[in-house]
């Protein structure tokens, strides 16, 4: 077998294909060997038949032999993923593999069609090798479910620490990226399902703005908020994947399009209450220090005060709360109600399109009944499905509270995010207006991180507002960092932590450019 570094970038892998140093067949063999070598990490639920993968790779090698214009650095227009092995999360439908979301109820289920992003990957010549493990139904089974656990895939391990703390729900995608089981992977996110496992396993995960990538053909939680996104080993690889799976014409791989010098950065490390040792306060200090020192070296203008505070309440068109923490907690409750309504409706709609489901499960009600009749389908530590039961109690999209709740959380969160990014409005403590939306004092991006079991207050506003978010690995937790809550949100020795960058909705390309320049600085130190 040809010797290939499994952690090479997508562009380096492509350059090797173009130059003839290796073939797609060589890449498939190498990654299959690694999948077998690291199978105890439970990163995969399904791997496509070896002979089928090799035949597909050989066919792509023949196509490449007929290309009329080659470039030895891998820069062939529209061909960056041609012949590159990719892994997708097991809620992404593919016509040639089962799609199960990790559930026993969907074992051997066949969609009969490709999700839009799977179609784009195949059309670009990518080789989808298999399906990554995940928190079952994207962690929409029971709130106590260990992150990274599914009935069909077992407990995913953290690729860099070897512990059962991988983050989730795109646990297997992050694990596969970190272990070098493919050139790149695809995860999905509703709320932290790309960001959390990417951070904990020290890879680059990108949650795009809603609509940048289609969520058509993906087993949903809530279509209002769901989005697929790349999880890779570098910002370059994330950009290469986005060039293929995104809906627009943006050239994401042009990572020099926006210069971070002169950009305005807001710090958001308000967690609603004081941090303690278990919350890894030193991680927050590391992030704050990085922002105030290293980002200034890059020429950024870093704002001194935390961007989220009670003063915002006087500037948004919703004033029923006295503190930003109270508003935050209210929005979380409403947000999860919206997820319950949309999951009840969306799951049935999706399963009705499947060509074959051996269990006969067709909607939320029959899924609950299946789990009750097959207790082996539930996690033995919790033996529950509370989130499914709560969703079933709603009226779905016809629930009398659904539309009003959705409209309110979108309006309020968007108002908060607009105010945060308009630093001039924040500083003058006046309502946001269209006149200052393009003010030269406006913020370009926010810096934050996870601490212990808690997300910063800004995160729920960013999620509901459907902002782009990206992780940049920064370090690993020390032996003194111990926090555990049913294996869901944990710090453990060796588990990663990251810078988290948040951009304005639609500023995906700009955020990637900034992330690339920060990543380059970290690698040079």
Image (cartoon, rainbow, N blue to C red):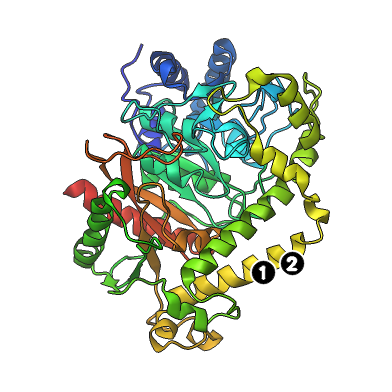
Q: Residues within 10 Å of mark 2 (few under 14, many from 20)?
A: few
Residue 180 drawn at (x, y percent): 38, 27
- Determine the secondary structure under disc 2: helix
Q: Is residue 189 above or below residue 443?
A: above
Based on the displayed image, in which of its 4 quarters is residue 446 positioned? bottom left
Which residue is more in the foreground, 491 or 418?
A: 491
Rendered image: mark on residue 408: 1
Q: Is residue 363 above or below residue 54?
A: below
Using the numbered discs, state the Cα–Cα distance from disc 1 to disc 2 in whole angstroms.
Answer: 6 Å
Q: Which residue is mark 2?
A: 404
Q: Is residue 48 above or below residue 414?
A: above
Residue sitting at x 58%, y 63%: 331
Residue 106 drawn at (x, y percent): 70, 24
Q: Is residue 88 visible?
A: yes
Residue 2 drawn at (x, y percent): 34, 15
Mark 1 touching mark 2, by CB under 8 A? yes
Based on the displayed image, in which of its 4 quarters is residue 118 positioned? top right
Residue sitting at x 38%, y 24%: 20
Q: Residues within 10 Å of mark 1 (few under 14, many from 20)?
A: some
Which residue is more in the foreground, 260 or 426?
A: 426
Residue sitting at x 77%, y 49%: 394
- Determine the secondary structure under disc 1: helix
In the image, is 99 to the left or to the right of 143?
right
In the image, is 399 to the left or to the right of 237?
right
In the image, is 513 to the left or to the right of 186?
left
Residue sitting at x 22%, y 53%: 521
């Amino acid at each position: 077998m040809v010797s290939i570094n499994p952690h090479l970038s997508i562009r380096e892998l492509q350059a090797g294909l173009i130059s003839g140093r290796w073939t797609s067949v060589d890449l498939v063999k190498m990654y299959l060997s690694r999948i077998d070598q690291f199978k105890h990490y439970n990163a995969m639920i399904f791997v496509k038949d070896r002979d089928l993968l090799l035949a597909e790779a050989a066919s792509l090698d023949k196509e490449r032999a007929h290309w009329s214009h080659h470039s030895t650095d891998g820069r062939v227009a529209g061909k960056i993923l041609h012949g590159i092995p990719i892994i997708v999360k097991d809620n992404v439908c593919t016509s040639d593999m089962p799609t199960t979301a990790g559930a026993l109820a969907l074992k051997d289920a066949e969609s009969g069609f490709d999700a839009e992003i799977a179609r784009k990957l195949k059309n670009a010549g990518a080789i989808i090798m298999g399906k990554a493990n995940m928190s079952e139904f994207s962690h929409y089974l029971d709130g106590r479910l260990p992150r990274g656990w599914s009935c069909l895939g077992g407990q995913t391990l953290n690729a860099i620490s070897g512990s059962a703390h991988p983050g989730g729900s795109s646990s297997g995608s992050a694990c596969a990226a970190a272990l070098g089981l493919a050139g790149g992977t695809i995860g999905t996110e509703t709320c932290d399902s790309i960001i959390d496992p990417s951070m904990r396993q020290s890879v680059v995960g990108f949650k795009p703005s809603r609509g940048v990538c289609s969520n058509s053909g993906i087993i949903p939680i809530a279509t209002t908020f769901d989005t697929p996104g790349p999880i890779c080993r570098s910002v370059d690889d994330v950009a290469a994947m986005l060039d293929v799976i995104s809906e627009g014409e943006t050239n994401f791989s042009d990572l020099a399009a926006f210069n971070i010098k002169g950009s305005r950065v807001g710090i958001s490390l308000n967690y609603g209450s004081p941090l303690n040792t278990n919350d890894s306060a030193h991680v927050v200090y590391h992030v704050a220090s990085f922002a105030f020192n290293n980002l200034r070296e890059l020429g950024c203008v870093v704002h001194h005060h935390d961007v989220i505070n009670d003063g915002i309440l006087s500037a948004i068109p919703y004033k029923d709360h006295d503190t930003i923490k109270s508003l935050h907690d209210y929005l979380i409750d409403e947000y999860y109600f919206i997820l319950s309504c949309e999951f009840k409706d969306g799951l049935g709609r999706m399963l009705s399109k499947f060509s074959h489901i051996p269990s006969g499960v067709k909607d939320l009600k029959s899924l609950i009944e299946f789990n009750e009749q097959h207790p082996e389908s539930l996690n033995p530590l919790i033996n529950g499905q509370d989130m499914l039961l709560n969703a079933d109690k709603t009226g779905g999209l016809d629930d009398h509270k659904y539309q009003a709740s959705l409209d309110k959380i979108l309006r309020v969160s968007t108002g908060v995010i607009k105010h945060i990014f308009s630093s001039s409005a924040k500083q003058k403590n006046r309502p946001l207006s269209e006149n200052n939306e393009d003010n030269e004092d406006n913020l370009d991006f926010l810096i934050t991180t996870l601490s212990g079991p808690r997300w910063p207050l800004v995160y729920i506003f960013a999620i509901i507002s459907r902002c782009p978010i990206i992780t940049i690995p920064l370090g690993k937790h020390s032996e003194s960092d111990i926090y555990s809550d049913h294996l869901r949100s944990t710090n453990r020795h060796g588990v990663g932590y990251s810078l988290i960058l948040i951009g304005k909705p639609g500023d995906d390309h700009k955020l990637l450019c900034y992330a690339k320049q920060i990543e380059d600085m970290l690698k040079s130190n």
